[in-house]
Image: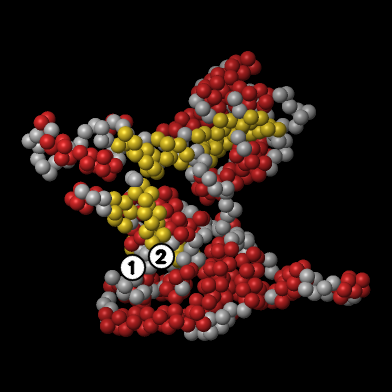
Amino acid sequence: MIAFTDIVGMDLAKQALMLLAVDSELGGVVIPSAVGSGKSTLARAFADILPESTPFVELPLNVTEDRLIGGVDLEATLATGLRVVQHGVLSKAHGGVLYVDSLSLLDSSAVSHVMDAMSRGEVLVEREGLSEVHPAKFMLVGTYDPTDGEVRMGLLDRIGIIVPFTAQNDYRARKKIVKMVMGTRDAEDTRDELNMLAGFINAAKEQLPHVSITDDQIRALIQTAISLGVEGNRVDIFTVRAAIASAALAQRSDVDEEDMKQAIKLVLIPRATRMPEKEAESNEAPPQEEMPPEEPEAEDEEAPSDTPDAEAEEEQKETPDMIEELMMEAIEMELPDNILNISLASKKKATTGSRGEALNNKRGRFVRSQPGEMRSGKVALIPTLISAAPWQETRRRDSKMAGRPKTALLITKDDVKIKRFRDKSGTLFIFMVDASGSMALNRMRQAKGAVASLLQNAYVHRDQVALISFRGKQAQVLLPPSQSVDRAKRELDVLPTGGGTPLASALYLGWETAKQARTKGITQVMFVLITDGRGNIGLQATFDPTAEKATKEELEKEVEALSLSIQADGVAAIVIDTQMNYLSRGEAPKLAQKLGGRYFYLPNAKAEQIVEAAMSF
């Protein structure tokens, strides 16, 4: 196995892991990097620079809940006749490192348990009649390929260091890697280097409590976080801790500018949501020769200097140069051009809660067991065995079961327990946008903004968004059901407009999309129609271009029949009318009534208003 000191490149990731080794209160390190960059090898090699007694536990992606948090040891329970509890992966990592490869692919339920353990420092085992608390204070090290998806923001909020994503395309580094892997390494030299590095880290741990940081430096780091649009008090604390750990690693007793730059690179930059404004830009204009008015000066002199406002102004005056210099030097070569689109950008969090959760017997998170027949669901094995265990001696004496092997477990249908799951499948929002007529471009722009806004928070509730455009002879799916912001941006770059208004075709295609989503476990579907409610192309023309033009009465009957079917299928709907009052004929309110939905009159709707209308239903 390749040692920590033998890994070529990824210097910033190495530095991040060393800071974590110095101060475990940083919570953890996340390393996003492309396939083949060596991120997983580096993460596993992290154990080389930790004390030998430190647990290093790898969490498999397919881990079950009982293996993750612990539960009843079935084999030992059956052998002893007493309930024996086994610790889960999280508690086994107590006092050490929990490593997750492909962190973005970890199941949502497992992520929730990891988040809870990191917040509490312990694991609550409440399952199958068992109630225990196991200590689980660990450092989390995670690696993943950003193309596989995003990491849950709630988890990243509990992790101090996120290594900025960098592509590994340096020829010299790649050549050196090949030579090292294909050649031979001196094991003794490697061991000496590891021992030396471990000694540096131990010395840094001893130095850590003696490192001091000034109020001005803390203020500068916080102001930098604000300038980058980074939210949350945890981030401020992590930034200060990272700066202190960097100073300790360099055997300094005071934090200096290099330590602050390191903290900005590893804590703030990966969470940035906007580009900072350079103060130099405001100074480009020539200075004014006019003297400031005398009255404000007099007022300033009279104002007491110890008021909160005065203190705040004074703080702002004390640190701008430090903030500007530190921020721009640290950020200049690190911030990507597409900062607003990076996967790790801190987005506004949606309100938490369980939307769309329902108990069922087939899928979701296992929450409890209940009596039932084997054919009615999945058997809860451990509760079934626990239910049968007390009756084994009695059943073996029963004449009907005499002659059975003593090692056989005798189970009757009364012992069988069925698993009950809590499913959180989210909602599928199907936007159906009228792309015909003079208002088409405006409607499509509104829909695109609303889709992007919903997708920002879709992962929290497992929501999905689809977009259907109807124009010409038929409707068209521009964006299939998706949670991906990047995919939506790619698919919605070109939005065709103009032509007829095949409203019936849109309703039919939306209904088919909803039925397909139901087969994949999505139980809640909502139609969001952005239209004036007028349709002039019949459904028949969708399947037969040579069909005769439908009459107004035929068009109304098609829409009414489809609306009744959609309503009977339990699909919610809202109709957003974008037509001006003086042009409206009342078709949109009638359409909302036929669908059993709600009507919103928003002629100049913004994306936020459309999202608010959809979420309020």
In the image, 97: left or right of 406? right
| Quarter placement of the C terminus | top right
In the image, 1: left or right of 209? left
Which secondary structure, mark 1?
loop
Q: Earlier in the sequence, mark 2 or mark 1?
A: 1
Amino acid type of the residue that numbered disc 2 sits on in the rendered structure: Phe
Amino acid type of the residue that numbered disc 1 sits on in the rendered structure: Pro
Q: Callout 2 environment at 10 Å: few (<14), some (14 to 19), or many (20+)? A: many
**In the image, residue 609 lies at what x, y percent?**
67, 41
Reading the image, the residue beneath label 1 is 55
Instruction: Answer above or below: position of 468 versus 225.
Output: above
Instruction: Answer above or below: position of 554 versus 128.
Output: above
Q: Which one is in front, 100 or 298?
A: 298
Q: Residue furthest left?
A: 403
**In the image, residue 417 lies at what x, y percent?**
30, 37
Which secondary structure, mark 2?
loop
Residue displayed at 77% across by 73% down: 306
Residue displayed at 16% across by 37% down: 394
Q: Which one is in front, 499 or 477?
A: 477
Reading the image, the residue beneath label 2 is 138
Figure quadrant of residue 529: top right
**In the image, residue 176 lies at what x, y percent?**
36, 75
Q: Callout 1 environment at 10 Å: few (<14), some (14 to 19), or many (20+)? A: some
Q: Circles 2 and 1: CB distance less than 8 Å?
A: yes
Residue 175 visible in rendering: no
In the image, 338: left or right of 280? left
Residue displayed at 68% across by 66% down: 277
Q: In the rendering, which numbered label is found on residue 25?
A: none
Q: Which one is in front, 538 or 53?
A: 53
